[in-house]
Image (cartoon, helix red, strand yellow):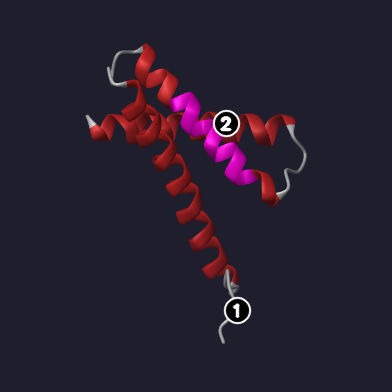
Amino acid sequence: MEITYAVIVAIVTLAAGAITKAFVEAIPDKFIPLQNLLIGIISAILCIVFDIEPNVLQAFVLCIMASLGAGGAYDLVMTKIKGEWLCKKL
């Protein structure tokens, strides 16, 4: 059942990314975590509607954590590729 969450979050993320690129010229980086939170909420609603998860709280927690985690992992990879770090070394 946990793999189903990942698939739903991935599909919703793909759709949200395509919609964002099509209709929004440039979204500031500070709004990306908010977009990830919205993706998690939409994914949880889909899990509840399609009866993948009967427990509402568990559906919201798992989907929100998956979407925020995916966004954080992506940001971490991209900052390392660009040669920048999230915090300065002492």
| Front of the two marks 2 and 1 | 1
Quadrant where the C terminus sits is: bottom right
In magenta segment, residue 40: yes
**Labelled disc at residue 19:** none
Front residue (pair 86, 18): 86
Q: Position of residue 69 (x, y in %)?
A: 43, 48
Q: How many marks?
A: 2
Kind of residue sitting beneath label 2? Ala
Q: Secondary structure at mark 2?
A: helix
Front residue (pair 36, 90): 90
The residue shown at (34%, 13%) is 50
Tell me: residue 34, above or below residue 89: above
Give, as a single range, the part of the protein colored magenta. Answer: 32-43
Residue of label 2? 16
The residue shown at (44%, 47%) is 70
Kind of residue sitting beneath label 1? Lys
Tell me: residue 62, above or below residue 71: above
Q: Are marks 2 and 1 in contact (CB under 8 Å)?
A: no
Distance between mark 2 and mark 1 Cα atoms: 32 Å
Most common SS among magenta residues: helix
Tell me: residue 80, above or below residue 54: below
- Residue 46 location, quadrant: top left
Front residue (pair 4, 22): 4
Q: Position of residue 5 (x, y in %)?
A: 33, 31
Please tell me which of labels 2 and 1 falls first in the chain. Answer: 2
Residue of label 1? 88
Q: Secondary structure at mark 1?
A: loop
Residue situated furthest left in the rendering: 1
Left/right placement of residue 80 relative to residue 4 reads right
Q: Position of residue 28 (x, y in %)?
A: 73, 48
